[in-house]
């Protein structure tokens, strides 16, 4: 009964989404307030209906209703409750329902925080979101119904993929989708602005907080996914340039470019068409990511569900949504003009350079991800592009971007005299260079790559300090605290996010430069020394889990003869699927991780678990700084949107330009 | 002129869609086997029924299919009706390689689901499977009169794969 309620809710949600997608848009075109007024209630109703469907599916999982195919395939009565809830989005169908729920949630949020938007603008924004929603609901209902019944009902479920039975996987998909789907708001604003023919600073100001929040969620989502890969895949890598990872990383790169370009459009009125294009691209890449992951066009370790029939639907949907948007862009963008002018050396030019670098990086990732597909389509053979390509192409592009990150915030809008800029940067350059030269020596081994990476990180830190000092010294307030308070949250958000990038670079550089690993055969009570630590293997003991049997190893870690940690790496065999999983044990510290994972028993008799084992040991200096940096970036994003001026300014500006009057790009 | 410039993103996107469309029709799992065009690895294994061994030498001079299957394999059930039809039609003999399986289970499975195989050989420890580069059950090989592997299908046979690839190839080889 409950699954049918869910199914019915989805059907009604589709009809509601169609009303939401068509009528308010029509109303905006013929200036009929009653039709435009439908936008809010329709969007809210649609969200409630999709949430109801989602709750029904979650209930089916929690109640172990194995007459629902989705539950029978992806759950098991032995599965602990929190993973049964997470299994709701563990399948293809469930994750698409989550996608749709997120889209509904963002639409709902727009209806709440849009009191000051002009009615035609709001109607168009909500309509665009409704149309995208309708597409996803159609996809769900026609190709991926999560409530499909299984006749006769299965006695027991096949269990959730063991890889997904992990705390990280409970939070990773919802956060990632929050970000992915969140770009739909900026996209809808861009389309609404193109349709309305009004692309100005007001539009940029409306889009900014939405974009930043979506970007921050996406950052956390990607970081969690990377952390999950680090400790569950058992070989200690944190990024694999896997197509599915790239699918989430490409919208992130575009979103980063969009945030910066929106800043210029809002404050200086420049880059208008470029910003609109970025908003379209960011969401298009979210859709493309969904297509790549769900269609089976690319194989990847992540591709949990693939089906070509679904691929055709998503491809058609992509063609309509993205093709339509880009056609609208081609038709309208030429009419909005390019906006303000700026000098060769100015904050605008720096941000433009940053945008260009980010987009070239995006293009290289997109090319690397799709290259195997292109070759195959042209009958040139099947190949796969691995980390060597991405490492060679990506890092050289990001290095100048990181360098510019230090210069940009110090440059003035419109024009900065070179001597002034140089004077400000001299000090920072000296500090960064000196630190970069000395630090690797302190860490034991000097290498050019490490020194260069550290230079970039310290350059970002040092220029941030210069920037902060300059802000304080020119402030008219008295007292340091008052001076600090005078700066806006959006400024501090920017500072924090940039520092996050520096922290991230330190993590990447040092783990790449100084990690050590050892694959050894260890007998019970045998020890191995690595990087000043001694690891003693004490054998394995069988241990039952809720839905798996585990062999838990015991490894003592000593430094200078003193016991500092006992690690318990596991090897699990899941009851229902018979799949095995390696759970690494990690001793985490601020200066690095000690990472131990179990290989296989290596005695002559392969079934003897009490003999010697293959054990993998890694020392990963500063690896947690990678995720720490990502969280700082996201935190910066959240702090930036807490800025009151978005709410206040919205009111005054909206009342000023209400209706169809063309707003002017205002200086801040 | 201006509109042309603003249409560049659209044009790029159209190209991308075209590639994705072609890509959809491809199967990324269709990895070419290094065995194609090479002699089929030889084996001499016990048959599932009776205790006579069967070796590749005995199969020289005819076109045959080697179908890798197992009683524990779920997707084998998907292609099984097709194999039964194929056996009934008598176009080409199908030999089964019962891969990493218990002979009792395998015999029970065939008794229950029907036996399409001219003969099935037992590869209990998977050695022959390794020689043939099996990386998932089911797999099907087409082997010609000279004992050379001509085609390999990974995953279950389908009506399309039989009609478009396997059967035309078999007919040509049998000429």
Image: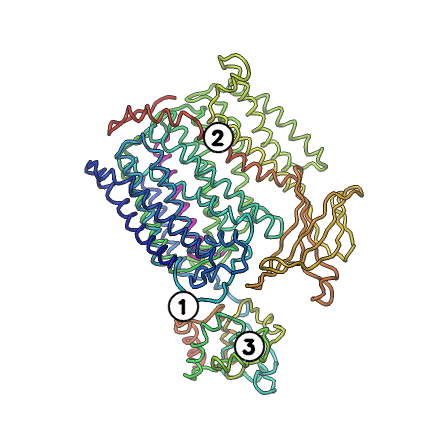
Task: Please identify the quadrant where the C terminus of chain A is shown.
Answer: top left
Query: Residue at left 28%, top 45%?
Result: A21
Task: Tell me the element at label 2.
Answer: helix
Where is mark 3, residue-wise? B97
Q: Is residue A656 left or right of residue A618?
A: left
Could you tell me what secondary structure mostly forms the magenta stretch? helix
Mark 3 to mark 2: distance in Å?
63 Å
Could you say which is closer to the camera, residue A606 or residue A285? A606
Q: Is residue A266 left or right of residue A573?
A: left
Q: Is residue A332 left or right of residue A599?
A: left
Crowd around label 1: few <14 · some 14–19 · many ≥20 (10 Å): few
Residue projecting furthest to the right: A561
Look at discs 2 and 1 and give the one toward the viewer: 1
Where is mark 2, residue-wise? A639
Does the magenta-highlighted stretch encompass residue A284? yes
Look at discs 3 and 1 and give the one toward the viewer: 1
**First reached walking from the N terminus: tag 2 or tag 1:** 1
The residue segment tinted magenta is A271-299
Does the magenta-highlighted stretch encompass residue A11? no
Where's residue A123, x and y in %?
27, 38
Mark 3 to mark 1: distance in Å?
33 Å
Mark 2 to mark 1: distance in Å?
51 Å
Identify the mark at residue B117; answer none if there is no mark. none
Where is mark 1, residue-wise? A151
Query: Residue at left 50%, top 57%?
Result: A383
């Amino acid at each position: 009964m409950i699954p049918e309620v869910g199914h019915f809710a989805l059907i009604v949600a589709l009809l509601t989404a169609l009303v939401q997608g068509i009528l308010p848009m029509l109303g905006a075109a013929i200036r009929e307030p009653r039709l435009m007024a439908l936008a809010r209630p329709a969007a809210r109703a649609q969200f409630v209906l999709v949430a109801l469907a989602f709750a029904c599916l979650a209930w089916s999982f929690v109640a172990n209703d194995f007459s629902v195919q989705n539950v029978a395939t992806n759950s098991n009565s032995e599965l602990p409750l929190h993973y049964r809830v997470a299994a709701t989005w563990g399948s293809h169908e469930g994750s698409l329902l989550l996608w749709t729920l997120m889209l509904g949630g963002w639409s709902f949020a727009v209806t709440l925080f849009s009191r000051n938007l002009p009615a035609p603008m709001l109607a168009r924004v909500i309509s665009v979101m409704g149309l995208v929603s309708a597409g996803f609901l159609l996809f769900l209902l026609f190709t991926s119904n999560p409530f499909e019944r299984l006749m006769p009902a299965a006695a027991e479920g096949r269990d959730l993929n063991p890889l997904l039975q992990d705390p990280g996987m409970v939070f990773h998909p919802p956060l990632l989708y929050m970000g992915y789907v969140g770009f739909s708001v900026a996209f809808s604003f861009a389309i609404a602005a193109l349709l309305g023919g009004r692309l100005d600073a007001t539009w940029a100001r409306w889009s900014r907080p939405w974009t930043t929040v979506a970007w921050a969620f996406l950052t956390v989502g990607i970081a969690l996914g990377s952390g999950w890969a680090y400790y569950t895949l058992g070989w200690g890598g944190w990024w694999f340039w896997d197509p599915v990872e790239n699918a989430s990383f490409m919208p992130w790169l575009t979103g980063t470019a969009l945030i910066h370009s929106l800043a210029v459009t809002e404050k200086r009125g420049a880059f208008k068409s470029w910003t609109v294009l970025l908003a379209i691209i960011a969401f298009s890449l979210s859709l493309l990511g969904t297509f790549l992951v769900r269609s089976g066009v690319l194989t990847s370790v992540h591709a949990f569900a693939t089906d070509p029939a679904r691929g055709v639907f998503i491809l058609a949907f992509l063609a309509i949504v993205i093709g339509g948007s880009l056609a609208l862009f081609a038709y309208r963008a030429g009419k909005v003009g390019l906006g303000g002018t700026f000098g060769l050396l100015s904050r605008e030019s720096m941000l433009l350079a940053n945008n260009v670098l980010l987009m070239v990086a995006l293009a290289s990732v997109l090319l690397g991800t799709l290259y195997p597909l292109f070759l195959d389509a042209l009958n040139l053979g099947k190949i796969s592009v691995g980390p060597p390509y991405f490492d060679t192409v990506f890092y050289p592009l990001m290095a100048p971007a990181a360098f510019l990150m230090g210069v940009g915030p110090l440059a003035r809008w419109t024009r900065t005299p070179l001597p002034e800029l140089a004077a400000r940067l001299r000090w920072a350059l000296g500090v960064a260079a000196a630190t970069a030269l000395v630090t690797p020596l302190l860490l034991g081994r000097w290498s050019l790559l490490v020194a260069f990476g550290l230079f970039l990180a310290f350059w970002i830190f040092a220029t941030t300090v210069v920037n902060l000092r300059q802000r304080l010294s020119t402030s008219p307030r008295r007292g340091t605290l008052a001076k600090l308070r005078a700066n806006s949250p959006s400024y501090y958000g920017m500072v924090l996010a940039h520092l996050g990038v520096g922290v991230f670079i330190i993590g990447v550089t040092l783990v790449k430069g100084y990690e050590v690993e050892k694959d050894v055969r260890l007998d019970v009570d045998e020890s191995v020394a690595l990087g000043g630590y001694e690891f003693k293997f004490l054998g394995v003991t069988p241990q039952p889990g809720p839905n798996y049997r585990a062999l838990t190893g015991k490894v003592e870690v000593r430094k200078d003869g003193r016991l500092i940690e006992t690690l318990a790496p596991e090897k699990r065999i899941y009851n229902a699927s018979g799949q095995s999983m390696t759970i690494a044990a990690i001793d985490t510290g601020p200066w690095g991780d000690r990472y131990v994972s179990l290989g296989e028993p290596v005695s002559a008799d392969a079934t003897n678990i009490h003999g010697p084992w293959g054990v993998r040991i890694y020392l990963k200096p500063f690896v947690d700084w990678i995720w720490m940096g990502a969280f700082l970036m996201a935190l910066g994003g959240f702090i930036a949107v807490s800025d009151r001026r978005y709410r206040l300014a919205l009111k005054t500006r909206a009342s000023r330009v209400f209706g169809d009057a063309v707003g002017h790009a205002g200086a801040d | 002129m201006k509109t042309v410039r603003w249409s560049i993103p659209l044009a790029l996107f159209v190209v991308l869609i075209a590639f994705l469309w072609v890509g959809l029709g491809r199967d990324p799992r269709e990895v070419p086997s290094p065995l194609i065009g090479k002699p089929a690895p030889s084996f001499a294994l016990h048959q599932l029924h009776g205790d006579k061994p069967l070796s590749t030498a005995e199969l020289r001079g005819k076109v045959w299919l080697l179908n890798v299957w197992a009683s524990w394999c779920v997707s084998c059930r998907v292609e099984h009706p097709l194999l039964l039809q194929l056996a009934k039609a008598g176009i080409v003999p199908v030999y089964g390689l019962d891969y990493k399986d218990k002979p009792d289970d395998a015999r029970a499975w065939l008794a229950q689901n029907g036996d399409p195989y001219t003969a099935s050989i037992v590869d209990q420890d998977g050695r022959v499977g390794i020689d043939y580069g099996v990386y998932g059950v089911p797999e099907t090989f087409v082997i010609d009169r000279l004992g050379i592997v001509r085609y390999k299908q990974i995953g279950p046979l389908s009506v399309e794969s039989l009609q478009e690839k396997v059967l035309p190839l078999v007919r040509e080889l049998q000429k």
